[in-house]
Image (tube, rainbow, N blue to C red):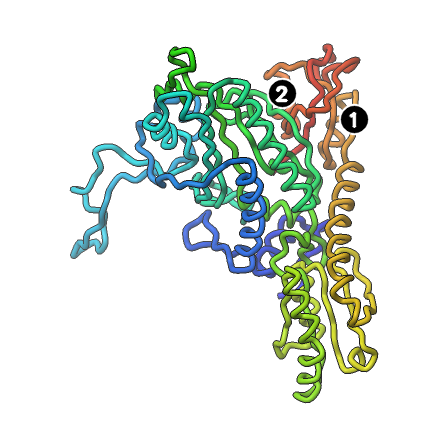
Amino acid sequence: MNNRPPKPKLNFSDWYTRIVKKAGLADYGPVKGTMVIKPYGFQLWENIKDSFDSMIKETGHVNAYFPLFIPKSFLAKEAEHVEGFAKECAIVTHTRLKNDEKKGIIIDPESKLEEEIVVRPTSETVIWSMYKKWIQSYRDLPILINQWANVVRWEMRTRLFLRTSEFLWQEGHTAHETQEEAQKETLDILELYRQLAEDYLAIPVFTGLKTDSEKFAGADKTYCIEAMMGDKRALQAGTSHNLGQNFAKAFDVKFQTKDNKEEFVWATSWGISTRLIGALILTHGDDKGLRLPPKVAPIQVVIIPISKNQNEKSKIESYLESPISALKLSGIRVHVDWTNSTPGFKFNEWEMKGVPLRMEVGPRDIKNNQVVIARRDLGGKIFLPKKDILSEVPKLLSIIQNSLFSQAKKFRDDNTFSVSSYQEFCSIIETGGFVRCGWNGSPKTELKIKENTKATIRCIPFNEDPDGKNCILSGEPAKHEVIFAKAY
């Protein structure tokens, strides 16, 4: 097999899967639709997780854990919610196996459950059953709980990180005294998602409101961050939902107000998942493999010693001891590759893994009291005096972080078009890109465009300007300016 993935322009789908596997991020699990996240991929997820976990803790949220198993009757309490997830649910019907002399291991028919159990597709129902126990008065509010967990949504067509039957995520579930508090929470979390995407993952996003046909099942309003991938398709990278009082009414969660009245609680939920790793690959990857933003890269600097014998190796070890210690003490994630592979093989491997900075050190560099630095974002080499390593490496990592964001933003902006004719709309959707245009607000119009082009409204952006625009399909005055695209 060729050591390099195919060029993304030639076969984007195959390129993506090859990079996921060759970079050591994940592999397919034994059950169709599942994945094994390998150590390098899990380190990347941990860095994303820790970044967001710090953000929500700073804003007063706390972590908890709720059960994986949910009584089937819980889902039936919120009609729109169960309808939205019914086709994706995995169900537990029995509790044990037994050995049959003729058939081998079989399900014990005597272990059938009185009520089937749903394997968590999302946790609103089980959490609101608990909130009913915990909330009596306005003094118990707000509740600002998040959990890091796995969920199961049975998928027929899967792709590593982007769409798998089981995935990792965080799901926040909050309870509030007023509608205004819930709405503020919904938008505050959306802003944290924007910051995570843009400031940590270097992925530019549009923020906005989902249409009713695209919103979360059981929500009053769904807000999202939408990103453009390298093939010009959209990826929904995070969602924040104002649930209104829907789940409070379904589970009869009321509280006593300050003036001794009884009211239903107001709710939100919000989540991001391991599909953010897919977003990183699809946004920043190139012909050589991954390009990881330094803030979340498992390894920020990889050092490649170049030696021919033990004597040279010992000299390099001694030469690097001080700068490596200094870099690690400053919080930079450093790895030294002492394997016996050739330098060329190591260069290719660490480029594939997307390490932001590569530092090469050989006998000639020791003689010149320098190191050779290669940037993953742009290529090329820099000769850096040894004395400047500690001061310059952090600067270079910051430059790379900003460079990746700027490149991705330019690509998105260059492929986002404002159009006024349906013919032009169809042409851009066919070749790839985001289209900003007018929409009359009709679900029928939205559905017809989706059926004709496979494009969906990704969001009604916060900075929409429908004035003077007409609906791209009907020609009627636009109620909204929206962003259409084909999506993952």
Mark drawn on residue 418: 1
In the image, is residue 308 above or below residue 210?
below
In the image, is residue 63 above or below residue 132?
below
Q: Amino acid at mark 2?
A: Glu
**Which of 433 and 68 lies nearest the eye of the viewer?**
68
Q: Quadrant of residue 115?
A: top left
Mark drawn on residue 379: none
Q: Quadrant of residue 70?
A: top left
Q: At which x and y percent is residue 246?
A: 43, 19
Q: Nearer the viewer, mark 1 or mark 2?
A: 1
For label 2, count other residues whose C-alpha is less than 10 Å away and answer few (under 14), some (14-19) or many (20+): some
Q: At which x and y percent is residue 390?
A: 74, 65
Q: Is residue 2 visible?
A: no
Residue under the image location 56 percent in, 27 percent down: 186
Q: At which x and y percent is residue 362?
A: 75, 79
Q: CA distance from mark 1 to mark 2?
A: 17 Å
**Which of 151 and 255 lies nearest the eye of the viewer?**
255
In the image, is residue 135 above or below residue 384?
above
Q: Quadrant of the N terminus?
A: bottom right
Q: Quadrant of the C terminus?
A: top right
133 sits to left or right of 213? left
Q: Is residue 122 visible?
A: yes
The residue wearing badge 2 is 446
Q: Amino acid at mark 1?
A: Ser
Q: At which x and y percent is residue 231?
A: 70, 43
